Amino acid sequence: MITLLVLLCILPQHHGQISAEWPWSEATIRYTSALGPYPRDRCPNLATVVLHDSEVYRASDWVWDRNDWARVLNGTISEEIKVGCRKVEKASPIAIAGNLLEPDVTSNLHSNITAKLSPTTVWSCSKQTPFILCCHQHNVGNYTLDPSTNNIEITKLCRDEPTDCWYNFTLTKSTYVTWNWQNDLTDKSGLKGLTFRFKINAMVKPTLTAVITYHSVSTSLVRDEHNVFPSFVAMQGDDVAIRCKLIAGSLTESVYSYGIGPHGRILHCEIQNQECWLNLTAVQSSHKIMCGKNYTKYWAELDISVVTPTTQTPVMLSPKFSEIGSYVQ
């Protein structure tokens, strides 16, 4: 039996993918605890796939939170999260199977899902000797507080889906997800179960910004809903420097950019002082710039329009006399 627990909890907000219908090739293969003797000859494990707004989290998106002692993904508030789980063996391929549950816009609590208030589980460690660190878990909060300020533990049982277990929810606050695979509990000699627990941080939706430095003045342009920046005009022969950023609250992340110049020539940004600068030196023609973060939906297009300086022949002014009169001393 597979059980998926989704623990919705209010945590401090940490401000800082490729689309696929069945992205099992991007699954993270790991478990955090085992019940019973572990059969190392078969190496059973748990495969977990997490999607946000139909984009799959890749291996590089998983980070380790040493404070919470858990693997963490960063999500955006109001994203639709889909979690898929299955048990795998070392020699077994990851195949496409099972049913994908459609999100219920009226209620996420189906007939095989239960919900209850639950305390927050946190880790604390103390040093017993200079070489031994003792860690344990304890609960913060209780079961009687108002649901808006405490945690809600949502449990979905997947008895009718023995291969895959899927659960969808809208990310409104940082969330713990725990899924459990249980073996035949009457078998006293084998593995009883495996558990994988991770967290999804809920962050403010980031803003993709292009900062253009021109004549020593920096101008910030923000991506619109059509993934386009406002165009920028430069004079032929001038230097233009561009750096792109993702800004979410107090977190600013430098992201990648490249430019497409005349004859399809591609220029890539270069890392300078922890930022990726795209330098157009003595620019002669218009460029199309692409800014964004690899494997995400945060990409936008920027047009650098180059105009020719206008030159005019100097005009010599001469006096004009309307009439000649007598000279007065």
Image (cartoon, rainbow, N blue to C red):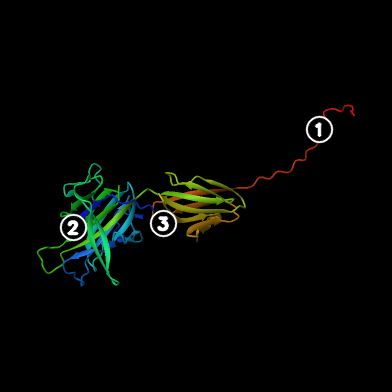
Q: Residue at x 75, y 40 (%)?
A: 315
Residue at the spot 27% in from the left edge and 65% down from the top edge: 126
Q: Residue furthest left?
A: 186
SS state under label 2 = strand
For the residues bearing labels 2 and 1, Cβ distance under 8 angstroms: no
Please state which of residues 213 and 290 is positioned toward the viewer in this rendering. Answer: 213
Label 1: element kind: loop
- Distance between the alpha carbons at the discs numbered 2 and 3: 34 Å
Say what amino acid the circle numbered 3 marks: Asn
Q: Earlier in the sequence, mark 2 or mark 1?
A: 2
Q: Tell me the tag on residue 272.
A: none
**Residue underneath mark 2:** 2
The reply, left or right, for residue 302 in relation to residue 151 is right
Amino acid type shown at disc 1: Lys
Q: Is residue 184 left or right of residue 166?
A: left
Residue at figure coordinates x 26%, y 54% from the top left: 176
Residue at image mark 3: 294
Q: Earlier in the sequence, mark 3 or mark 1?
A: 3
Q: Earlier in the sequence, mark 2 or mark 3?
A: 2
Element type at marker 3? loop
How far apart are the two marked residues, 2 and 1, measured between alpha carbons?
Answer: 99 Å
Mark nearer the viewer, 3 or 1: 1
Is residue 218 depicted above or below 65 in this figure? above
Residue 191 placed where, x, y %? 16, 67
Residue 180 visible? The answer is yes
Give percent across and percent down for residue 36.
Answer: 16, 67
Residue behind mark 1: 320
